[in-house]
Amino acid sequence: MIPAFDHTGPFIWAAFSLSAIILATVITGVTVRAAAAKARLERLEGEEEIE
Amino acid sequence: MISYFANPHRFMKLSGVLTPWLFAAAGVMIAYSLWQALWIVRPETYQGDSARIMFIHVPAAWLSMAGYAGLAVSSFIWFVWRHELADMAAKAMAPVGAAYTAICLATGSIWGKPTWGTWWQWEDPRMTSVLVLLFLYLGYIAIRAAMDTRQKAARAAAILAMVGVVNVPIIKFSVDIWASIHQTASVVRLDGPSMPAEYLVPLLIAALGHSLLFTGLLFTGMRADVHTRRADALVMRRLQAAE
């Protein structure tokens, strides 16, 4: 059930939504970069083993 | 102790185990604090429902300052002892700290409109000093990206981080020293918190949850840097072998 607020409701939703968007962006950025770095290392190590 | 944890192999082993648990605990605590903030706590006597914004604004404010203090300490450790993990920690802290500072500024501005009747006031020492903090984080990230070698980037960024840390106590005490529309501290006070337990407990749980998320993201960023450096070393070795 969506909570009902007084006249400041739009401000509350705006604050929490904006925070969620910023956090989701930074979490995605950090985890994607980490996954890419790990995949690159594994690929290079794999090539090293083949050689 | 610093040298013990400065070993990348030991860090990778420890962080590999800890990081998923940090994210899981952070998820549970943040979800609980959101449930409390949006559904359970009663509207505040004077501010009404808008006080609920506190449950994201205050943890973000604390983490923006703690993050920069951590950035400065890590930079100092790298500067003095040249522990590469400290430099990786500083580098990984910057985007997360900048994100929390942006959240603090955005939610503070949104909360300010119904409470003070204004989105922003340039004369206010708390607002402008937090904006300066955001610029310091962005400056740190920009300096790291602009330098052509890793050593130069680490050195220039470390100097900025160590000089810029003077802004952290300015932010903390700005509302006590200068006239500000921002309220004075209501949790971290010499005479104890002035907030009722109904608000204080979920607020502290939210702060702990976001701190664990910050740490999880810090470890993830550092692990990515360790992987990148190992991969770069492999490429260098291949190039040298080919010559």
Image (cartoon, coloured by chain):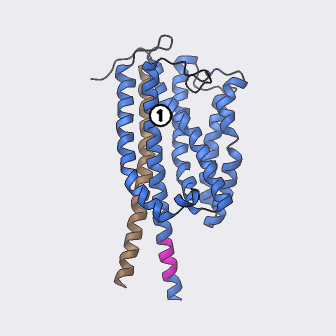
Q: Is residue A23 left or right of residue B95?
A: left
Subunit bearing disc 1: B
Q: Is residue B217 left or right of residue B154?
A: left
Asked if the stretch drawn in magenta spans residue B232, the answer is: yes
Which chain, by letter, is brown?
Answer: A
Residue A38 location, quadrant: bottom left
Q: Main secondary structure of the magenta part?
A: helix
User: Could you say whether the residue bearing mark 1 is in a helix, strand or loop?
Assistant: helix
Which chain, by letter, is blue?
Answer: B
Region of the chain picked out in magenta, as a range = B231-238
Q: Nearer the viewer, residue A29 or B168?
A: B168
Q: Residue at x 44, y 48 (%)?
A: B216
- The crowd level at tag 1 (other Cα within 10 Å; few <14, some 14-19, many 20+) is many
Total number of numbered discs in the rendering: 1
Where the C terminus of chain B falls, by quadrant?
Answer: bottom right
The residue that mark 1 highlights is: B207
Q: Is residue A48 above or below residue B127?
A: below
Q: Is residue B189 left or right of residue B38?
A: right
Res. A11 in view: no
Amino acid type at circle 1 is Ala
Q: Residue at x 65, y 25 (%)?
A: B121
Q: Residue at x 62, y 67 (%)?
A: B149
Q: Residue A49: x and y, percent?
A: 36, 81
Asked if the stretch drawn in magenta spans residue B120, the answer is: no
Res. B203 in view: yes
Q: Nearer the viewer, residue B180 or B17?
A: B17
Where the N terminus of chain B falls, by quadrant?
Answer: bottom right
Q: Residue B191: x and y, percent?
A: 60, 20
